[in-house]
Amino acid sequence: MRFLLRVLINAAAIWLATEVLSGLEVVGGATTTERLLIFLGVALLFGVVNAVVRPIVAFFSFPLYILTLGLFTLVVNALMIMLTGWLSEQTDIGLRVDGFGTALVAGLMIAVVSFLLSIVIPGARKKKD
C-alpha cells in the first residue's frame, strides 16, 4: 500500500513540476485518463530508477558528497530526472527534459513536493518503531 502511495505522490510532484517549469513536459496522451496513466508510468519509472541506479551512483560519488557537504545530491537528483526522461522517451510517450538546468530545478521541486505530500498523507512515510 505504501508503494502505491509513493507512486501517487511522485506522480503528483512530477505533474506540479511540469506545470511550473517550461522545459519539463510529459508528452503523449490525448485524454485526461491517458495523461494520468502517463504520469503514473513516469512516476513508477522514476521510482525504479531511484531504487536501482541511484544507490550505485551514490556509492561511486560518495567522495563528492563529502566534498560538497551533500550538495552533490542535487546533481544526482538531476541526473536521475534526466535518465528517467531518456528512458521514457524511448517510446512516443514520457517525460521530456530540455536540459540539465531544468532537471536540476525539477529534481529540487519533486523532492520538496514529495516530502511535503508524504508528511500530509497518512501512511506514506515509514513509521519508526
Image (tube, grey):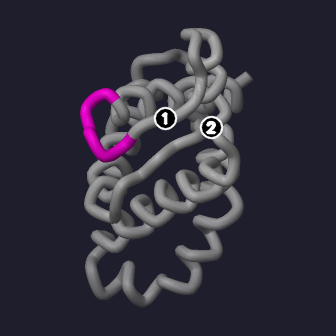
Q: Residue furthest right?
A: 1
Q: Give the labeled residue for mark 1.
A: 26
100 relative to 81 in the view: left or right: left
Location of residue 70 by image quarter? bottom left
**How packed is label 1: few (under 14 Cα within 10 Å), some, or many (20 or more)?**
many
Task: Work out whether residue 129 or residue 74 is closer to the camera in this orientation and state it.
Answer: 74
Rendered location of residue 7, percent (x, y): 62, 31
Range of magenta residues:
19-24
Task: Work out whether residue 57 or residue 97 is closer to the camera in this orientation and state it.
Answer: 97
Query: Which amino acid does the dot numbered 2 rest on?
Result: Ile
At 37% from the left edge and 51% from the top edge, which residue is drawn?
107
Q: CA distance from mark 2 to mark 1?
A: 7 Å
Location of residue 127 by image quarter? top right
- Residue 92: say if magenta: no
Q: Give the labeled residue for mark 2.
A: 93
Mark 2 residue element: loop
For residue 83, above or below residue 72: above
Rendered location of residue 64, percent (x, y): 38, 85
**How packed is label 2: few (under 14 Cα within 10 Å), some, or many (20 or more)?**
some
Rendered location of residue 122, percent (x, y): 53, 16
